[in-house]
Image: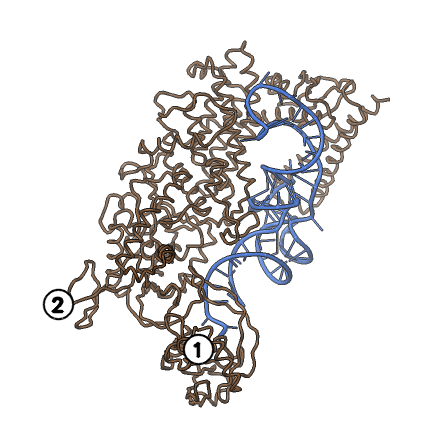
Chain colours: A brown, B blue
Amino acid sequence: MSDPAPVLSDRYDPAAVEARWYPHWESRGYFSADPKPQQKPYSIVIPPPNVTGSLHMGHALNNTLQDVLIRMKRMDGFNALWVPGTDHAGIATQVVVERQLAAEGKTKEDLGREAFVERVWRWKEESGGTIIRQLKRLGASCDWSRERFTMDPGLSRAVREVFVRLYDDGLIYRDDYIVNWCPRCQTVLSDLEVEREDRDAQFVYIKYGPLTLGTVRPETKLGDTGIAVHPKDRRYAKYVGQVLDVPSVQGTAKIKVVADEAVDPDFGTGVVKVTPGHDPVDFEIGKRHNLPIKTVIGFDGKMTAEAGKYAGLDRFEARRRIVEDMQALGLIDHIEPYRHAVGLCYRCKTVVEPLVSKQWYVNVKPLAAEAIKAVRQGRIKIVPRGWTKTYDHWMENIRPWCISRQLWWGHRIPAWYCERDGSVHVSREDLTACPTCGGPVRQDTDVLDTWFSSGLWPFSTLGWPDDTPELKTFYPTSVLVTGFDILFFWVARMAMLGLRFMNDVPFRDVYIHALVRDAEGQKMSKSKGNVIDPLVMMDKYGTDAFRFTLVALAAQGRDVRLAEERIEGYRNFANKLWNAARLVLSNLDGYDARQAAKTPAGLADRWIVSRLAATTTEVRTSLRRYRFNDAASAVYQFVWHEFCDWYLEIAKVALYRREDAAARLRAQHTLVTVLEATLRLLHPFMPFITEELWQRLPRDKRAPDSIMVAAYPKASRRQHDAEAERDMTAVMGVVTAIRNIRGEMHIAPGVTLAVTVKPGGEHAAALRETARLVEFLGRCRLTVDPRAARPPASALAVVGASEIYVELAGVVDLAAERARLEKELKRAADTIAFLEAKLARPEFVERAPADIVEKERDRLAEQHQLQQKLEGSLAWLTEASR
RNA sequence: AGGCUCGUAGCUCAGUGGGAGAGCGCCUCUCUGACGCAGAGGAGGUCGGCGGUUCGAAACCGCCCGAGCCUACCA
């Protein structure tokens, strides 16, 4: 065991504590889990962060929630495995290294492919540890001995295996198709990688021979190979099938008119130019009508030789020039301002150019069908439920997945082309010669979409394609915790590929959490300058406070709005816990656990034990339902407002009065046992401070070496004590009433009041037992007497059936008491009026459930009683002040 | 265009059919022997609007207003 600091300071200092415990846990091997058939497994795979990235708020939230779950389950006796790792993040990483090269005045082509890839690996080695260190800083209890990287040899083997099998099954194919091309990144993008943004543009109405049509992309006019109208559009029916002579900037072109359902007759003029080479819709129309493809914009975003005199011009410059030229020729009817969605590269925000090229695709339709079924049958449970709809909708409308990328960093596509006979060979092993003719081969130059490898993550990290004990034990994983932004990119792909290759779902639950935003609800981004750096927050307020904040704000279906004041609030909470423990620890002299256990438990002891049991149940239930914020607030409420506000204050009475040794022992015992269990309950949320304090508490010799491997609290029925809860509620009510009178009457806290309680029925015993407590907590001398008469010049409070008289003679003027009573009386009268009106309506009495009606009647009776007592008091006061 | 989510105390948010809640902030008091990163007390809300279902609606349904997100080939 590491040595805790010798003395507890009066403020919790997170830095020293955090530095101490993580290495301890790690060196003891508490994070690692091995397949053990006799123990129930619980497993999570981490959503792998970008290997060269650093921790942001999204990671912090995501990993805190996972750590809460895995720590709780580990303590609860499960064989808990959390597999960590990182993702090679194709484009993102390549772009970073390209930028580094640019700073040196070089390009990746200068280096050549091999040297460039080597350079990326070097950068990965250099910066790859950052995010891992940061996760450790956060307290993440991952099994680091199982850390994986998507380009590890084992995972790369899984990638090839999947590729080959899908290819053999005819689900991977190569096709000429129109794709999203980023002219800056020089690669194709999947549909998901294209972002939409509304932009202002010109809607140019061009004369096409006898027709006029509108377009936002006049530069693609040079690639037009058709004109389309709706088949039912009477206005243009006569042109369908004709070949029109269309005068244009490059002389007159012959263009065929076709009829196609894709045309909306109500939009613009109802006539559309068809450019199959540069528009996805036009591409489909072209296919249906056998229109030729004419490519006038190249992969570099510049006009091609096909564009004649515009060749070499940037596509946007060409647009301006062509409009000018057409205007000069009188070919433009008019121009309207227009706002429409433009496709942008998700990485560099360059306007995506639709282009026709040959790419690799996965036909995911049949895989999606299985993935839909798995959710529908409940084999995968999505939490919160609402996301199921989004998942279904996307899966049902899924399109072929373009998986080739024109990058150098990633898994190279395992396909070889024979230079002699042109045959294509997909292979698990690298090929050096054509398997059919023995001729020379060259490998496809493209790499795979990064999500192709991360889609295998839940089983590739556990050793697939080998049949490992890890897979047998930990697959399917128990839960996947992730943000909704990668539901399609990642979750959906894992579901499809897991079902295909493991014949089982990759995870039983998917918990989808929200995005972290700033206090104004804005998405955090560097350009807005509103990012809150998790590392700065951890330094400033402590990791535990930071984690607790994230958990407390993680309500289902809500964005997490993070304001620094919240973290500060939970920093105070950590400090509160620290000081509570300080109080307990500094009053343990003479404590003997075995002796103490024999002393009788008082009302307050039974009460706090009962409350702890209720809190334990609530935390467990909330975590099971992924209601993280409910779990956090239950434990917060208990620690601060029950344990600290009440029990600690009560315990002081016994602690400081040494003459009653048994009472003191009992208080010590309750303090130690309740605090100890509370620390365990809190540990998954606040791992560091709980360990530090737990280590200092006296405990059994057989107890484990660390709180993180101690048992998670379970509430037993024995601990639940309804009677104690009821009686303590009455006692606390009396104390609060006395304090309330003191506050409202502005009586100095130092003044000891004379108080008489006339207890109502069942509270008499409890109030007598706790009389000394009430005196201490209410700063008063207390008389409990069922036949008490009201003392002269006293204030009255009513708690349930009990009456409380606070003597005011010489302490306060009676007018203030009259004002206070009148306020109370009005409140009672309002409630009575409301309840009487409710009970007066026959519909309510007849149709509402009997117990509800009963409850309202009881309430009314209670209020009537209160009213009577208050009125009596007021009359008495008037009499007394004469 | 379609879909989804959200409008509750000054701020951030819990609360899915029976007495309007929490944290922070605010006001008053307290230099009490765990903690001023504290303690005690208090003020503050026609639950976005309108209509409907119901004995009963912050909650369920419809419409409207406002904020946001996702999906989409209206050139």
Quick one: B19 or A735, which is closer to the camera?
A735
Q: Residue furthest right?
A: A882
The answer to whether any part of residue A846 appears in the image is: no
Residue at the image position 34 percent from the left and 61 percent from the top: A107
Q: State which quadrant residue A837 falls in.
A: top right
Q: Residue furthest front?
A: A105
Quick one: A29 or A55, which is closer to the camera?
A55
Q: Which residue is mark 2?
A: A438
Q: Secondary structure at mark 1?
A: helix
Q: Which residue is mark 1?
A: A220
Quick one: A228 or A770, which is closer to the camera?
A228
At label 1, the amino acid type is Thr
At label 2, the amino acid type is Gly
Q: State which quadrant residue A374 falls in.
A: bottom left
Task: Tell me which chain the residue with mark 2 is part of.
Answer: A
Q: Count residues near mark 2 (Cα–Cα under 10 Å), then give few for <14, some for 14-19, many for 20+.
A: few
Q: Position of residue A426 (x, y in %)?
A: 22, 63
